[in-house]
Amino acid sequence: MEGSFDYIVVGAGSAGCVLANRLTADGRYRVLLLEAGPEDRNLWIHVPIGYAKLFTDARHNWLYNSEPESELGGRSIIQPRGKVMGGSSSINGLLYIRGQAEDFDHWRQLGNTGWSFDDVLPYFRRAEDQSRGEDELHGVGGPLSVSDVSETHPVCDAFIAACEQAGLPRTDDFNGKSQEGAGYFQLTTRNGRRWSTARGYLKPVRRRPNLRVVSSALTTRILFEGRRAVGVEYAQGGTTHRARANAEVILAGGAFNSPQLLQLSGVGPADLLREHGIAVIADMPGVGADLQDHYQARFNYRCSERVTMNDMMNSLAGRVTAGLRYALFRKGFLAVGAGYAGGFFKTDPSLATPDVQFHFILFSADAVGQKLHPWPGFLASVCQLRPESRGFVRIKSADPAQAPAIQPRYMSAPHDRDVMVKGMQLLRRVMRQPALARYIVEELVPGPKVATDAELLEFARQKGTTVFHPTSTCRMGSDVTAVVDERLRVHGFRGLRVADGSIMPTVVSGNTNAAIVMIGEKGADMILQDAKAGAARAA
Ligand SMILES: Cc1cc2nc3c(=O)[nH]c(=O)nc-3n(C[C@H](O)[C@H](O)[C@H](O)COP(=O)(O)OP(=O)(O)OC[C@H]3O[C@@H](n4cnc5c(N)ncnc54)[C@H](O)[C@@H]3O)c2cc1C
């Protein structure tokens, strides 16, 4: 062993940076944070619009693809994931959405004590530095900066007005008492810069003497003594290193990589491990099971006025003006990631809470990450918030450098197909309201030929894609296939936890970053409480 630490955190992503900060705060514990990707030095990580560039950037993105999906006509779907300090919080769309209070109450109802909304709210508040100030739901002074978009936009105003004309409510806070409504998003930014967890949690504490951060270091195996995790093996610059964890190894590699690392280390479905020649330490079929994700259908519109991001990006004068506005005032398109506005709605009025989310995006392209159209255009998308479809992550090789098989099985549950169709109908109802008529020349995709329910479903199958929210592959619970308990300890092991998006019992009804930061905060608190209790017992 080359180094000895109290805690080893694998993955410096949304949750990993939170853990590294909180576990080193009182100076008592030595922590090693291992990140497979590089430092976050690239300019486009920090300028929100750089989000579009990072989709296809192999230096900062794992660039995974799902396996061919039978419900989607055999298509594979791109699965970007951050591979850099800050993880996916360094490449994401920056939207700050917590999910619904009911999501966490549901987690609690499934038997996960300590995870109801009332239980987790203090961690959301503790994380937050809300630019609007503090109230019972929002916090100030936390490491995660949350701000309003720098300015409104006339087409977004028209979208919000169109929602109201369609009989849907308006909201000025998707993280308020009720999530339902149309409005402007808040972003994880400060003064127009991205506020990843690497920026908010890690950078301010990098000099703590009890924290060692190693970048470009791929953790290849968890080391066990019997059923106790005692360290990890990692590869850096062609050399294999070993580090010891005297207290715990904490996996924070995200929904694809945490189950992959467990499987590579002998913890997972026994037949899969044997197939790849890996000695089975524990037969746990739940490791890599229950993959959930948000699937979206994107509608594409030709705009009547040259006010969209396409027009800015497709002209030199537009790019210069936008660059200057950003440099001087931190305003304009460069200060926005995935979008300005959206909404959460019910496809059936009898529902208790919204079951679909709309993203309204001021650019258009044929597919995610591709070249913008040469004409003025925008997109509106719909995703189902609580999918019943379940997929999996399974290693394809015993080589840690090989990507695992990712199979979300989008729309494999009939309920998900129904909600997608109803969501698309609702989206069209909004987009046909008078408030937007001035801006819409035509719906280009799917276009007027796609009219019936069956045609809409076929469109979703052929053109839909992910909203990048994979979760639940090391699911928290107490049933036979659950992987971690309500304190995030891997069932049947000592010294081993998972604390990232993979532990969500069900995906939250919204974008996932905020909830995963909360998981990091709560996970750190539980680890420190358990350490204290252990020390008291030993004394
Ligand atoms: C393109 C995109 C857009 C998104 N947009 C939004 C949005 O607008 N709002 C929102 O709320 N959410 C958004 N999300 C989702 C959100 O960002 C993620 O759910 C969240 O960041 C995941 O957090 P995590 O801690 O589980 O994993 P990650 O943040 O992905 O962190 C995992 C880290 O572990 C590292 N790692 C993995 N395996 C190993 C290993 N073996 N050894 C060492 N290091 C390892 C990875 O490189 C990575 O840095 C988006 C995601 C993507 C990809």
Image: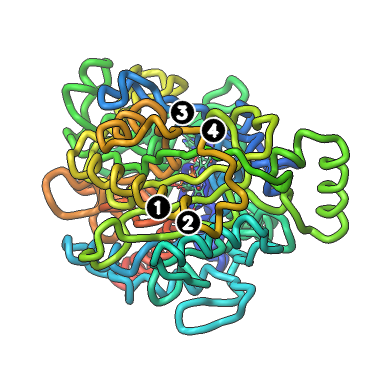
Where residue 25 appears, x then y in whole percent? 56, 66
Q: Which residue is tagged 2?
A: 433
Q: Which residue is tagged 4?
A: 368
| Residue type, numbered disc 4 | Val
Q: Which residue is tagged 3?
A: 78
Q: Are marks 3 and 4 in contact (CB under 8 Å)?
A: yes
Q: Earlier in the sequence, mark 3 or mark 4?
A: 3
Q: Which residue is tagged 1?
A: 429
Residue sitting nearer the eye, 284 or 244: 284
209 left or right of 126 in image: right
Where residue 184 appears, x then y in whole percent? 56, 63
Question: Is label 3 in a helix, a strand or a loop?
Answer: strand
> Can residue 523 be seen in the rendering of this structure?
no
**Distance from Cα at disc 3 to Cα at disc 1:** 29 Å
Residue sitting nearer the eye, 33 or 534: 33
Q: Quadrant of the C terminus?
A: bottom left
